Image (spheres, helix red, strand yellow):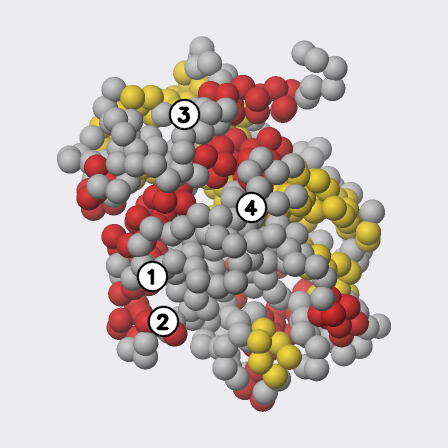
C-alpha cells in the first residue's frame, strides 16, 4: 500500500475500476449490443442491516421500452469483498415492463457499519460492481460519519465532473437534495450548452423515462452511484418548475392535468433511483419523507417540501414582500409531515439531527425586501412553527441541509431575522449545484448586497460542486468542494472554504 493510501481510497480505486469508470462510453452515442446495464447500478437508503439495490435493464435507451422485448430474470449478489470471493447473499428478481424493467432489492440481515459490494447479472451480462455501506447499529456512537450533499445536475448546463470527485471521496452516503433531472426541452438561454437534452419538455411517463435514461447514461453520475449509497429526495424539476401540491405553471390551470403529469414523473423517479418500496408512488402520490439513523450519532430526516405545499404567494420566484407570505394557513410540509417531523425531533436520542430538504429555510433577503417565494420565505407561518419548535423544544444539534439555489449559502436560522442578537436556532448549509447555471460569472454587486441584507449569512459563493461533511460527536466539519469548470472535461476539484459547527452551539464558524 503506497504511503498515504487509506483503506477507503484503496477500496474506492478497486470499486471504481470494477465499475468501469476508467473508460467511460461516449454519452451521446446510441448504445450497441445487448448489455442491459447501460444505466449503471446504485444503492440507497442505508439501514443498519442493509440497503436497497437498484438497476434498470436498458439495452438501448433510444428504443421503445429501452430495448427490452420481454421480462427478464436478474440475479443479484452481495459480497464482503470487491472480488466476490465470499458471496454473502444472492437472489433473483423478474423485471416487469410496467416498472420499465427496473430492479429494486431491499437487503436485510447484513452487519452494521461495514462495506459491501454488489452486482447484477442478466441476459448473459454482468453489471458494473457497486460499493454500499450499512449504517451503524442503534445504540452505538460511531467515531465519525462522512457524507456529501449534492443536487441540481442540469445535463445541458454542464458536465457532471463533480460526481466523479464524489466517487473518489466515497463517503458513507450522499444526500441528493433534488433536481436530479430537468424536465425542460432544449435549453435556449444565454449559458453555453455542454450537451443537449433529447426530446421536448417532459409531460408523459415515456418522456420522463427517456430523460432519466439520458441523465443516467453519464459515466460520472454512474461512478458516484457505484461508489456510495445515495439518499435521494426530489425538488421541483423531477416534475415541473416550481410545482406545488396541485399546480405547476407549465401544466396550465387544470389540477387533473397536473396530477396526471406528476404521477408519471414520480413513477419515473422511483423507477430510476435506489428507493425502498415505502416510496413507491400510487395514484395518491408518494411518501417521500422518511427517517434514517446512523447510530446515536445522527438522525437524518428527509423532508418533502413540494408535494404538500400550498401554492406560492405574491407570484412565484423573486418577488417583493406581500401580505400573503404571512398567511397563517399556508403550508410547506403539510400537517401530517409537520407533526411527523416534530415527533421525530422531540423523541430523538441522536447527538445530531439533520433535516435534509430542498429550498432555503433561513430568510434570505435578495435586497430591498425581495424574497424567493418558492422557498420557505413564501411560507413564514410554516417556518415560524418550525423555528418556534426548535427554540422551545431544543432538539440536540439540529442542522438543515438544503439546495435549489445553485449557489453555496451558509448561514443560521434565527428566532427573529430582523434582530441579529436574537437566538440562533440551527445552522443551514445550502449546497451549490453539480452543474446547473454552468461556470460562474464574476461576482456582481448582488453578492455584497445580499450579505449586507442578511447578517445571519456567513458565506455566499458561486461555484459548481458539492459539500462534504465529516461528523463526530463533538463537531461537524464542512468542506466546500468546487470544480474548476463544468464545460472543460476532467476539471479538478478544490476545497474553496471550510466551516465547522461545535456540538452545543448552533453558530457556524469559518475554519
Ligand atoms: Fe435546480
Q: Decide if residue 182 is on the left or right side of residue 199.
A: right
Residue 303 to residue 155: above or below? below
Q: Residue at x 52, y 84 (%)?
A: 314
- Disc 3 vs disc 1: which is toward the camera? 1
Figure quadrant of residue 363 = bottom right
Residue 123 to residue 276: above or below? above
Give the Cα distance between marks 3 and 1: 31 Å
Give the Cα distance between marks 4 and 3: 27 Å
Circle 3 is placed at which residue position?
Answer: 128
Q: Earlier in the sequence, mark 2 or mark 4?
A: 2
Figure quadrant of residue 281 = bottom left
Q: Residue at x 79, y 58 (%)?
A: 507
Figure quadrant of residue 38 = top left
- Disc 1 vs disc 2: which is toward the camera? 1
Q: Quadrant of the N terminus?
A: top right
Circle 2 is placed at which residue position?
Answer: 250
Kindly tell me whether residue 200 is visible in this rendering: yes
Give the Cα distance between marks 4 and 1: 23 Å
Q: Residue furthest bottom?
A: 323
Q: Decide if residue 55 is on the left or right side of residue 399.
A: left
Q: Residue 201: which numbered mark, if any?
A: 1
- Disc 2 vs disc 3: which is toward the camera? 2
- Measured as percent of width and height from the top left, residue 404 is found at 55, 60
* Mark 1 CB near ligand 1 (8 Å cut): no
Q: Secondary structure at mark 2?
A: helix
Amino acid at each position: 500500500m503506497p504511503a498515504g493510501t487509506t483503506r477507503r481510497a484503496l477500496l474506492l480505486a478497486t470499486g471504481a475500476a470494477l465499475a468501469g469508470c476508467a473508460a467511460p462510453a461516449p454519452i451521446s452515442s446510441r448504445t450497441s449490443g445487448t448489455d442491459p446495464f447501460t444505466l449503471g447500478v446504485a444503492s440507497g437508503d442505508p439501514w443498519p442491516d442493509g440497503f436497497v439495490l437498484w438497476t434498470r435493464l436498458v439495452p438501448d435507451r433510444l428504443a421503445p421500452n429501452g430495448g427490452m422485448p420481454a421480462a427478464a430474470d436478474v440475479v443479484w449478489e452481495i459480497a464482503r469483498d470487491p472480488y466476490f470471493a465470499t458471496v454473502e447473499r444472492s437472489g433473483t428478481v423478474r423485471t416487469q415492463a410496467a416498472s420499465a424493467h427496473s430492479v429494486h432489492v431491499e437487503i436485510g440481515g447484513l452487519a452494521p457499519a461495514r462495506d459491501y459490494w454488489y452486482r447484477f447479472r442478466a441476459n448473459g451480462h454482468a453489471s458494473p460492481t457497486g460499493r454500499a455501506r450499512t449504517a451503524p447499529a442503534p445504540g452505538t456512537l460511531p467515531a465519525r460519519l462522512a457524507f456529501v450533499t449534492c443536487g441540481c445536475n442540469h445535463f445541458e448546463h454542464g458536465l457532471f465532473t463533480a460526481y466523479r470527485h464524489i466517487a473518489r471521496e466515497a463517503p458513507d452516503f450522499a444526500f441528493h437534495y433534488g433536481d436530479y433531472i430537468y424536465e425542460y426541452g432544449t435549453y435556449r438561454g444565454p449559458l453555453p450548452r455542454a450537451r443537449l437534452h433529447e426530446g421536448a419538455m417532459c409531460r408523459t411517463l415515456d418522456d420522463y423515462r427517456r430523460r432519466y435514461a439520458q441523465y443516467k447514461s453519464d459515466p460520472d453520475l454512474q461512478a458516484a452511484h457505484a461508489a456510495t449509497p445515495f439518499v435521494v429526495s426530489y425538488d421541483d424539476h423531477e416534475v415541473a418548475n416550481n410545482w406545488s401540491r396541485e399546480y405547476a405553471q407549465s401544466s396550465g390551470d387544470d389540477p387533473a392535468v397536473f396530477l396526471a403529469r406528476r404521477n408519471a414523473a414520480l413513477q419515473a423517479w422511483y423507477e430510476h433511483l435506489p428507493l425502498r418500496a415505502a416510496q413507491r408512488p400510487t395514484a395518491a402520490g408518494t411518501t417521500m419523507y422518511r427517517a434514517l439513523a446512523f447510530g446515536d450519532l445522527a438522525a437524518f430526516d428527509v423532508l418533502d417540501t413540494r408535494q404538500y405545499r400550498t401554492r406560492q404567494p405574491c407570484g412565484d420566484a423573486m418577488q417583493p414582500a406581500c401580505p400573503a407570505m404571512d398567511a397563517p394557513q399556508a403550508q410547506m410540509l403539510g400537517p401530517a409531515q409537520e407533526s411527523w417531523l416534530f415527533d421525530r425531533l422531540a423523541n430523538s436520542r441522536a447527538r445530531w439531527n439533520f433535516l435534509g430538504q430542498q429550498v432555503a429555510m433561513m430568510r434570505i433577503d435578495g435586497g430591498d425586501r425581495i424574497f424567493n417565494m418558492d422557498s420557505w420565505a413564501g411560507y413564514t407561518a410554516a417556518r415560524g412553527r418550525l423555528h418556534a419548535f426548535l427554540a422551545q423544544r431544543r432538539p440536540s444539534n439540529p442542522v438543515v441541509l438544503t439546495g435549489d439555489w445553485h449557489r453555496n449559502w451558509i448561514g443560521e436560522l434565527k428566532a427573529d431575522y430582523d434582530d441579529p442578537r436574537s437566538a440562533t436556532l440551527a445552522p443551514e448549509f445550502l449546497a451549490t449545484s453539480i452543474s446547473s447555471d454552468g461556470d460562474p460569472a464574476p461576482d456582481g454587486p448582488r453578492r455584497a448586497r445580499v450579505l449586507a441584507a442578511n447578517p445571519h449569512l456567513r458565506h455566499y459563493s458561486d461555484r459548481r460542486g458539492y459539500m462534504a461533511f465529516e461528523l463526530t460527536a463533538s463537531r461537524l466539519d464542512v468542506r466546500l468542494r468546487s470544480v474548476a469548470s463544468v464545460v472543460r472535461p476532467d476539471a479538478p476539484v478544490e476545497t474553496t472554504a471550510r466551516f465547522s459547527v461545535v456540538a452545543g452551539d448552533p453558530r457556524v464558524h469559518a475554519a
